[in-house]
Amino acid sequence: MKRKYEGVIVLNTQGAEEKVDELVSGIGKEIEEEGGKLEQIDKLGRKEFAYNARHLAHGYYVNYHFEAEPEIIEKLRGRLQMNGTVHLQYYQRKN
């Protein structure tokens, strides 16, 4: 049974500020390749971290709204951990 999810992903864009749109759409494609159906992508922009985590002062926040089977979330987590531009990722079930 498909459920609706919200995923907040923080991208490490240091040295790649001009490629933000490409990075955001690439992660959207990865969600779809794992079987998710994208509904909306909200670019929240660049925000400073409260502390310097892993030698990174800021990140680019993106909010993905999608529909997927529950088991896809773990596959997606693993796949995006291998992506060097993904700094943090958090998923929450909606409704």
Image (spheres, rainbow, N blue to C red):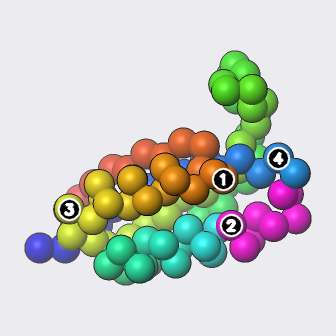
The CA span between labels 1 and 3 is 23 Å
- Tell me the tag on residue 71: 3
* Residue holding disc 4: 14
The CA span between labels 4 and 2 is 12 Å
* Residue holding disc 2: 23
Which residue corresponds to the image point at 54% horizontal and 42% vertical from the top-left? 88
- SS at mark 2? helix
As displayed, is residue 53 above or below residue 16? Answer: above
Mark found first going from the N terminus, 1 or 2: 2
Q: Which residues are magenta?
A: 16-23
Q: Position of residue 84 (x, y in %)?
A: 63, 51
Q: Amino acid at mark 3?
A: Glu
Q: Position of residue 77 (x, y in %)?
A: 39, 53
The CA span between labels 1 and 2 is 8 Å
Closest to the observer, 46 or 74: 74
Q: Amino acid at mark 1?
A: Thr
- SS at mark 3? helix
Mark found first going from the N terminus, 4 or 3: 4
Q: Is residue 44 magenta?
A: no
